[in-house]
């Protein structure tokens, strides 16, 4: 993760900084003041906390170290906006972020403006060092991660409000009938997976390495709402034989035996999207599923989830670049869309796809140096890998080698299913 910046590179970095920082605010532009403070569950952070935390990242890791004479905007904010960095001192408990009526949202926005002004001054100095150039890139990637979290946290906040308020009402989710799924076959071989070149990647995507791939087949699109509804209506949540033991214990406690944001009313299934509460569309990819549900559904179909290596092998075979028309944060729909054609394999965008792989280090894994070494490595336990990005992921943020990870019960993110056999 090293670059040799030139003047055009730095100018592009300035423009990218401005664009990404403004996108975070645009996501929140229709929220009411009360929406910025809510934390209905521990997995969800208040929107104003996200806006402050990503700003603290730039101040704490860049301005303090690279801008001569820089003084902290407010040294108390380190305690509030530090997330999990033990090396950066004490912090408020994650579960208590919703108790923060102060600083106010207006104060957080003022903090952002101050840091942005200081960052722009810093980046307009010439020349800038390779280490500063790279670190700003990390900060922007970090903010894009939080844009996805911000959007999904907002969905949880609004989708658990009995009024089901929409975030946007001006975006139509396209729909058309989706054809039968097919499976793409791969012969056994030794594959190279992981990030290879000098473009940006997180440390958990490296090193590129060889792995043996057994013969397998993988579905040419995502599982749809209609297909998953068959599992629901067949009593899949009541049949223990399809569930892992932990998953069965988890499923028995569900108030609604269905994906998150599904509601049954007068014999009809409804789904909350960020466009409001709508009749369930059978053609759209099913989303907001836990690993337990994805695995149980695959077993019910007599299949399985792909490993992350199988997923990457298939994605590399079918794609040469990130699709320009994919369902990402950029298109503003904020929901997965149906398969556009039989050449639309839906590997990138739409939903994060659960894999059968535990989140573990690659052979020869080396974490980032310093405080950023806490970013990924210490979470490599009791979590499962997801691939592909989602409709909440900025398009410029995703890669074929990107490894996301969550605990098996989590489903507030846009998570879904692709089958393998």
Image (cartoon, grey):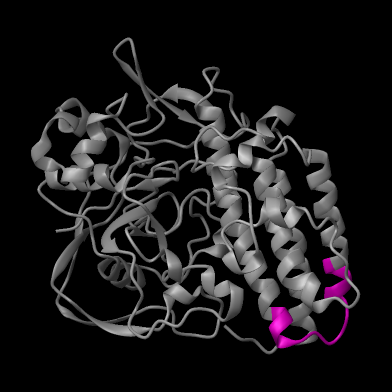
Residue at figure coordinates x 85%, y 54% from the top left: 113
Judged by its main secondary structure, the magenta piece is helix
Q: In this view, does 108 lie to the left or right of 166?
A: right
Rendering quarter of residue 185? bottom left
Instruction: Give how far across and how far down residue 350 sits, in percent.
Output: 43, 49
Q: Residue 365 vs residue 157: left or right?
A: left
At x 59%, y 79%, the residue is 370
Identify the residue at horizontal 36%, vertical 74% (top origin). 361
Residue 132 falls inside the magenta stretch? yes
Viewer-nearest residue: 390 or 208: 208
Position of the C terminus, as image quadrant, is bottom left
Marker count (numbered):
0
Q: Position of residue 106 (x, y in %)?
A: 82, 40
Name which quarter of the figure residue 200 lies in.
bottom right
Write the residue at 25% across / 31% down: 229
- The N terminus sits in image quarter: bottom right
Direction top: furthest residue: 266
Rendered image quadrant of residue 89: bottom right
* The residue positioned farthest toward the bottom in the image shown: 4
Whether 362 is drawn above or below 99: the answer is below
Can residue 219 be seen by looking at this rendering?
yes
* Residue 333, visible in the rendered structure: no
Residue 11 screen position, x and y as percent: 79, 76
Residue furthest toward the front?
Answer: 90
Tell me if residue 63 is in the magenta stretch: no
49 relative to 390 in the view: left or right = right
Q: Position of residue 119 (x, y in %)?
A: 82, 68
The magenta segment: 119-133
79 shown above or below 335: below
């Amino acid at each position: 993760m090293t670059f040799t910046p030139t003047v055009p590179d730095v100018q592009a970095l300035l423009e990218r900084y401005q664009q990404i920082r403004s996108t975070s605010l645009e996501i929140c532009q229709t929220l009411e003041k009360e929406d910025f403070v809510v934390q209905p569950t521990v997995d969800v952070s208040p929107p104003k906390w996200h806006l402050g935390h990503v700003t603290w990242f730039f101040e704490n890791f860049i301005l303090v170290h690279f801008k001569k004479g820089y003084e902290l905007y407010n040294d108390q904010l380190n305690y509030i906006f530090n997330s999990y960095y033990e090396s950066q001192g004490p912090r408020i408990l994650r579960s208590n972020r919703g108790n923060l009526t102060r600083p106010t949202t207006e104060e957080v926005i003022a903090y952002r403006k101050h840091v942005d002004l200081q960052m722009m001054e810093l980046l307009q100095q010439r020349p800038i060092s390779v280490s500063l150039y790279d670190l700003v890139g990390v900060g922007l990637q970090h903010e894009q991660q939080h844009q996805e979290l911000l959007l999904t946290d907002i969905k949880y906040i609004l989708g658990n409000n009995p009024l089901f308020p929409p975030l946007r009402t001006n975006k139509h989710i396209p729909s058309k009938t989706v054809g039968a799924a097919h499976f793409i076959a791969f012969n056994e071989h030794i594959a190279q997976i992981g990030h290879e070149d000098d473009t940006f990647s997180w440390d958990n995507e490296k090193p590129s390495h060889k792995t043996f791939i057994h013969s397998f087949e993988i579905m040419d699109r995502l599982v749809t709402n209609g297909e998953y509804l068959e599992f629901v209506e067949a009593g899949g949540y009541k049949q223990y034989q399809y569930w892992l033991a932990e998953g069965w214990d988890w499923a028995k406690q569900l108030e609604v035996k269905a994906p998150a944001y599904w509601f049954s009313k007068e014999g009809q299934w409804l789904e909350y999207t960020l466009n409001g509460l709508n009749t369930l569309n059978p053609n759209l990819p099913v989303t907001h599923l836990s690993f337990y549900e994805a695995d149980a559904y695959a077993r019910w179909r007599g299949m399985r989830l792909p490993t992350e290596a199988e997923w990457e092998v298939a994605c590399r075979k079918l794609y040469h670049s990130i699709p320009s028309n994919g369902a990402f944060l950029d298109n503003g729909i904020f929901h997965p869309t149906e398969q556009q054609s039989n050449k639309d394999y839906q590997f990138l965008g739409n939903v994060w796809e659960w894999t059968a792989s535990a989140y573990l280090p690659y052979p020869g894994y080396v974490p980032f140096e310093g405080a950023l070494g806490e970013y990924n490595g210490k979470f490599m336990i009791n979590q499962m890998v997801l691939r592909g990005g989602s409709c909440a992921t900025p398009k410029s943020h995703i890669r074929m080698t990107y490894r996301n990870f969550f605990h098996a019960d989590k489903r507030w993110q846009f998570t879904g299913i692709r089958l393998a056999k």
